Structure formats: structure tokens, C-alpha cells
Image (spheres, grey):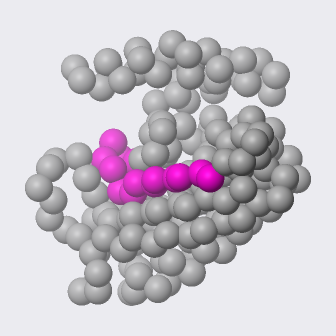
Amino acid sequence: FPVTIPLATWTFHFKDLKVANGFVYNQSIALAVRQSIQDWIHQSVYIKWPNDIIVKDKKIAGILIENYIQGDEIKSSLCGIGVNIFQTHFSFPHATSLVLAGSDIASTDSFLQTLHKNLLEKLEELKLNPFVIREQYLLHLFRSKDLIANVPNRYLRCKAYLLYQLIGRHHLHRSEEH
């Protein structure tokens, strides 16, 4: 089989990305990776804060982002993404791959093309409407669906998300240990 865990790094350069929007930028990258995996399988794919992508309670991908900041702006960003594509055996039990999740993917190049397309689309969406990125992120956040799903409007969902970020994350993390 081809490379089992492809790691690709993208460099993005920005003209007007404020540091205050850095977290929304990270959310857009996570959404692009999540969508790219979703494009190849028929199972639900979630984002586990801050940098993992999860399928059936197992890690399928990881993201590392390093931003270069000047003043109050992010000038550029290195974004490293690793995805388990063909691997069928893992040294730890909470991992999976596209193949184990039922994908019929034939090459790493196919996945990387999908990922590149989704990254560019999400970054364009970030420019147009960062609030939509935040809302999409909430909808795909691992184990937050029960917390946020029944919140009636966008404003309250945003507040529920902030509450999750402040206190819920710790509670959910502790519940995973049991």
C-alpha cells in the first residue's frame, strides 16, 4: 500500500487576518479536514477540540497549526495535517483509518486533492462569513451535539459554545476517562 499516514503541510499567507480571528481560522482548517474525510466515508466525522478528527470515537487525523504574528495580524500560517488512510493495525486502540471506516480510496493523492480543495473553500468562506464557520464547527464538535443541538437560535448557540469552551470541555474530557 502507499504511505499509511500522509502528512502534508500547507503555508497560507494573509493580508488582513486579525489575531482575534485566529481561533476561527483554526476552526476553518479543522472543518476542511473533517469534510475531506467525510467525502470518503459514510460515517459521521467529528472534530475533537483542539486538533483531532474523530470517527466512531477513534482518531483518524490530527492537525498542527503554527501562526506567524506581526502586531495584531496573522501574517502566515503553517498547517500540518496527518491522516490515517490505509493503516489497518494500530499500536493503540483508539485509532482508525479511512480504509477501516469503509472508504474505497485508491491513493493518497486522491485524498490530498480533496483536502486541498476543501481547505481553499473553507478559507474563502472564512473571509466571507466567519460566523458561519463558528456555527459549522459547533455542529461537528465531538460530544457537543447534546449540549448545543436544542439551542433555538444562532446567538444562543454561540453563547452555548462559549460556555462549552469555558467549562464544558473539562467536564466532557473527564467523562471520556471513565
- Coordinates of residue 24 in the picture (x, y in percent): 69, 42
Image quarter of the N terminus: bottom left
- Coordinates of residue 96 in the picture (x, y in percent): 28, 57
In this view, 91 is above or below 52: below
Image quarter of the C terminus: top left
Residue found at the very far front of the displayed protein: 71
The image quadrant that residue 106 belongs to is: bottom left
Residue at 38% across / 65% down in the picture?
83
Judge by depth and name the residue closer to the eye, 65 or 98: 65
Residue at 77% across / 60% down in the picture?
14
User: As drawn, is 140 to the left or to the right of 40?
Assistant: right
The image quadrant that residue 145 belongs to is: top right
The image quadrant that residue 91 belongs to is: bottom left
Q: Which residues are magenta?
A: 54-68
Residue at 56% across / 16% down in the picture?
166
Name the magenta segment's main secondary structure.
strand
Judge by depth and name the residue closer to the eye, 24 or 157: 24
- Coordinates of residue 3 in the picture (x, y in percent): 29, 81
Residue 44 appears in the picture as rendered: no
User: As drawn, is 46 to the left or to the right of 99?
Assistant: right
Label total for image: 0
Judge by depth and name the residue closer to the eye, 59 or 146: 59
Residue 104 highlighted magenta (yes or no)? no
User: As drawn, is 43 to the left or to the right of 131?
Assistant: left
Residue found at the very far right of the displayed protein: 128
Residue 54 appears in the picture as rendered: yes
In this view, 162 is above or below 55: above
In this view, 15 is above or below 132: below
Residue at 25% across / 52% down in the picture?
95
